[in-house]
Image (spheres, rainbow, N blue to C red):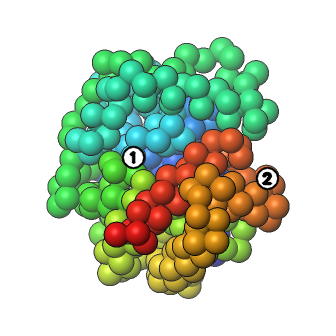
Amino acid sequence: MRTYRAGKIQDHLWYFGRKESGVYLLEGSVGSMIISGGMSYIVPEILRQFDEFGINKDRITKLLILHSHFDHVGIVPFFKHLLPDLQIYASSRAWEILGMPKAIETINEFSRYVAERMGMAEACSGYDLDWRNGLQGAHVREGDYISLGDIEVLILETPGHSSCSISAYVPKLKALFPSDAGGIPYGNTMFASGNSNFTKFQRSLEKLSKLDVHLFGADHYGYITGKEAPQFMAETIETAKRFRADVEACYWRTQDIDAAAKELIDAFYIEHPDYFLSPEIHLGIYRQIVRHIADALER
């Protein structure tokens, strides 16, 4: 079952934000952790939801960034300002990217652009949401555990969607939070988004498929429970294979990375016109995907 309604999922776990961008609150005996950083424009909605459900913000001691793309780090600066003692975790590669002036410029530019696209610019106008250089935190890597007392979170390195992607697995809840490294549920289907290296992305899917998963917590379009949750990774693996074959066929036909990306993205928005990313941003992602797959074909 796919759900994106804000509120309590089960003991220890909540979902907050909006349909197209959400974060999770994991509650332990010695504090709580926000999992993922969402898009910046969901901050007003999260604050409203915290008040609605009586969430004690002072119990939030940790925030885990799963990768450094703009739509997954947006709430981080605000919550670090709101909660100065907040410990922020990310991979070493993510911290490297998040310290680059060009990356910071892109995060802030794209965040504003998507807020406008979603009609949220005015609602966010009273909040300081920009990422600034100097925001730092702890580095995590494969096999590390983050403890919340009676709840532990296992870190897995899952590159491919981005070079800095990590996933979080909570053994006690059998809950997986892979961000976009595990595929993106949308409607009744899913997208395989191996943005930076599609081959590594497919390997990461295989790695995650070995976990015992009763809850799949996506960053976009909610979370999955019930019978679908343990099957979702296997279905995403097959989707990735089909998508790669489609990209290969398009590239062989056009013999041009830009032309293939444009053809693929045009077809995507015919089927999914309300997807949260604008075609202009998404086209850049498809260029990356086609470029990697084209390079692999020509080796």
> Which residue is pictured at 67% across the width and 35% down the height?
114
> Which residue is pictured at 67% across the width and 30% down the height?
113
Q: Is residue 179 left or right of residue 50?
A: left
**Hey, which quadrant is residue 95 in on the image?**
top left
For mark 1, give the secondary structure.
loop
Q: Amino acid at mark 2?
A: Asp
Residue 8 visible from this viewpoint: no
Q: Position of residue 188 (x, y in %)?
A: 71, 74
Q: Position of residue 54 (x, y in %)?
A: 56, 39
Q: Is residue 18 above or below residue 125?
A: below
Q: Is residue 99 above or below residue 198?
A: above
Contact? badges 1 and 2 (CB < 8 Å): no
Quadrant where the C terminus sits is: bottom left
Give the crowd class for mark 2: few <14, some 14-19, many >=20 residues within 10 Å: few
- Along the line of sight, the residue nearer the viewer: 217 or 131: 131
- Along the line of sight, the residue nearer the viewer: 35 or 296: 296
- As drawn, which residue projects farthest toward the front? 255
Q: Is residue 267 left or right of residue 255?
A: right
**Hey, which quadrant is residue 199 in on the image?**
bottom left
Q: Is residue 132 above or below residue 116?
A: above
Determine the CA span between mark 1 and mark 2: 24 Å
Which numbered disc, 1 or 2, marks the residue that appears first in the sequence? 1
For mark 2, give the secondary structure.
loop
Quadrant where the N terminus sits is: bottom right
- Along the line of sight, the residue nearer the viewer: 99 or 4: 99
Q: Is residue 200 left or right of residue 55?
A: left
Kindly identify which numbered label has been placed on residue 274: 2
Q: Amino acid at mark 1?
A: His
Residue picked out by circle 1: 67
- As drawn, which residue projects farthest toward the left? 143
> Which residue is pictured at 43% across the width and 25% down the height?
102
- Along the line of sight, the residue nearer the viewer: 89 or 164: 164
